[in-house]
Amino acid sequence: MTIQWYPGHMAKAKRQMIEKIKQIDVVIELVDSRIPMASRNPLVAEIASGKPQLLILNKVDMADPAATKLWQNHFIEQGAHVHLVNAQTGLGTAKIPEVVHSLTAERRERLESRGFHSRADRALILGIPNVGKSTLINRLAGKRIAKIGDRPGVTTAQQWIKVGKTMELLDTPGILWPKFDDPAVGLKLAATGAIKDELLDFQDVAVFLLKTMLVRYPEQLRDRYGLEKLPEMPTEPVSEAIVQLFDAIGRRRGCVISGGNIDYDRTAELIIRDYRHQKLGALTLELP
Ligand code: G4P
């Protein structure tokens, strides 16, 4: 469920998250590999308040592997600890406790030097809606934990889930709001389904997808819709080239209204659905 965030929701969610993080050793921020920047919330560093952070790029199966490599290097250059997973199949998830453990070495040494036994590493997963937080928690728990609605400010009794020998994970994720102040970010969030469909115009989102594909993934575009020739890359917001593309796709897919005209709304929906269901291939929508 995607909800709409209001300033009151955000303030409350932030306060609750800061409170939760007091019991945490490592903050795991989960993002969508197709939009590794747009699916981040810039407040994480502030919320983490100096605790070690792990940035996990999820849904690697849905993203372009070459672009994921670029993003991984980019974040590492920025000093982040990065890990890649596919929460749905479990690829990369078994290593998470080990990675988390490596981030708590300093804390453990400090405790042990004072004669204390260090306990398990306590971690929390946070991120904006739809990045796969529940899927990852269920995967790490090895069972299905009831999905908590994406409702800001809803507190439920929380429990620690034991993951491997060294890690304990909070069973409820921290849900952050997506940042839509930048229209380009909004389009990326909408294309992946991270924000409510009603918040954006379908045609705008489809135009954004088509432009991205014309520039970076023309083969996939041609293959999916059986197009012989692609128009030249447009420069204007909605150029003639994009209209031609809409016409060709709409006609091929039978999105036609009376009089033989193309139903642009249906065509746009079809393009977005194809992207979300990976019918267009594994495509990353932004590069570092
Ligand atoms: P959230 O808690 O962060 O809001 O995300 P959630 O786990 O609900 O995941 C959102 C959608 O992303 C789900 O699909 C989930 O199956 C899918 N997903 C999560 N991780 C991965 C991944 O690594 N790869 C792929 N391909 N998909 C992933 P859904 O269609 O909304 O639900 P459902 O089909 O699982 O019922």
Image: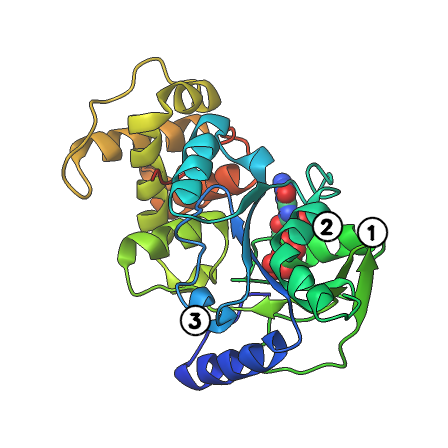
Q: Amino acid at mark 2?
A: Pro
Percent across and percent down for residue 160 are 79, 69
- The residue where tag 2 is placed is 97
The outermost residue toward the left is 236
Q: Secondary structure at mark 1?
A: loop
- Mark 1–mark 3 contact, CB under 8 Å? no
Image disc number at residue 164? 1
- Mark 2 neighbour density, 10 Å: few (under 14) some (14–19) many (20 or more): many
**Residue 249 figure quarter:** top left
Q: Is residue 142 visible?
A: yes
Q: Secondary structure at mark 2?
A: helix
Q: Between disc 1 and disc 2, whose residue precedes?
A: 2
**Residue 83 figure quarter:** top right
The C terminus lies in quadrant:
top left
- Mark 3 neighbour density, 10 Å: few (under 14) some (14–19) many (20 or more): few
- The residue where tag 3 is placed is 46
Q: CA distance from mark 1 to mark 2?
A: 7 Å
Residue depicted at x 71% and y 46%:
98
Residue depicted at x 53% and y 42%:
276
Q: Amino acid at mark 1?
A: Gly
